Image (cartoon, rainbow, N blue to C red):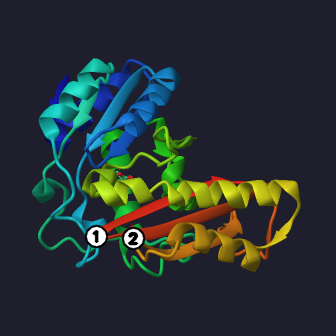
Amino acid sequence: VNQLASIRSMRALAQEWRARNLTVALVPTMGALHEGHFSLMRKAGAMADRVVVSIFVNGLQFGPKEDFARYPRNLAQDLAACRKRGVAAVFTPTERSMYAPDHSTYVVEENMSRSLCGPSRPGHFRGVATIVLKLFHIVEPHIAVFGQKDVQQAAVVRRMIRDLNCPVRLVVAPTVREADGLALSSRNAGLSVRERALAPRLWRALQMASSLGRARPCASGAVEKKMRAVIEGDDGAVAVEYIGIVDRRTLQPCSVVRRGVLVAVAAKLGQVRLIDNVVV
Ligand code: PAF
């Protein structure tokens, strides 16, 4: 697989493709690739002539107490996985090349970033929007593929694309799950055996909310209470950070769970923070 570590070589290749009228799809990642990423790559490959996967653990989107240092990194395995899946180029920039020591320009989205993960992860979406815009400038993709698991991230990027006139089409691919419902995430690797066994509670609670809301509109407060009971149980091993019942376009709170509403959760199992969501 064509691994490009410099911005200059990535840009040159992307521009060569553009000159040949080839369409380009970007799958931005932080590596530790799994089936969720592979499904994004398949989607990208079905929609464009060339697929670029970027692998960059973006320090800017991690808070000082978050898992940047612990975030899994296995480049050799990731490159082999990309090769197997027909990826045309893997962009692996260095920290130094992406951020000058005195870099001071950021992309700040001020609406979609505020709810759900916003309060507990100050600066996170600023880091995401900034790196994604930089990747758009370097790769100049026609299409960018993101996962539904990170639904708020996709909403922030969609808003940035609109507000800053990025000539990129955003595509969101469905969440890929383990057989027991746990959403695939690079962070799942950090779960202990016991935590891994408890992790599917998030999906179970989301499914419960979804079936309640499908049957008849239900007051959000009551649904949230039931979800909390499912996730936290009585062992205290899983701590809910938030349960968000929101409009799926605006991410603003909804007082009623009904069809089309987005239900999102974040919870901590030991050191590991997991998120998941469902559209009723
Ligand atoms: O979803 C991710 O892996 C990251 O947030 C992204 C989009 C690659 C930006 O660093």
Q: Quick check: 274 left or right of 270?
A: right
Q: Is residue 41 visible?
A: yes
Determine the residue located farthest toward the front in the rendered image: 234
Q: Secondary structure at mark 1?
A: loop
In the image, 89 versus 6, the foreground residue is 89
Q: What residue did someone put label 1 on?
A: 271
The count of marks equals 2
Is the residue at mark 2 in contact range of ligand 1, meaning its CB lies under 8 Å from it?
no
In the image, 211 versus 27, the foreground residue is 211
Q: Point out residue 37 in the picture as x, y percentages from the top left corner.
A: 39, 38
* The C terminus sits in image quarter: bottom right
Q: Which mark is residue 268?
A: 2
Mark 1 crowd level (few <14, some 14–19, many ≥20, 10 Å Cα): few
Tell me what residue is drawn at x 26 percent, y 67 percent. Answer: 60
Query: Residue 143, relative to residue 217: is it above or below?
Result: above
Q: Secondary structure at mark 2?
A: strand
Mark 2 crowd level (few <14, some 14–19, many ≥20, 10 Å Cα): some
Tell me what residue is drawn at x 17 percent, y 48 percent. Answer: 73
Kind of residue indicated by mark 1: Gln
Q: Are marks 1 and 2 in contact (CB under 8 Å)?
A: yes
Kind of residue indicated by mark 2: Lys
* The N terminus sits in image quarter: top left
Q: Quick check: 57 left or right of 171?
A: left
Q: Point out residue 108 in the picture as x, y percentages from the top left corner.
A: 44, 72
Q: Point out residue 174 in the picture as x, y percentages from the top left corner.
A: 56, 40
Q: Point out residue 30 in the picture as x, y percentages from the top left corner.
A: 28, 49
Is the residue at mark 1 in contact range of ligand 1, meaning its CB lies under 8 Å from it?
no
Q: Residue 217 is drawn in which quadrant? A: bottom right
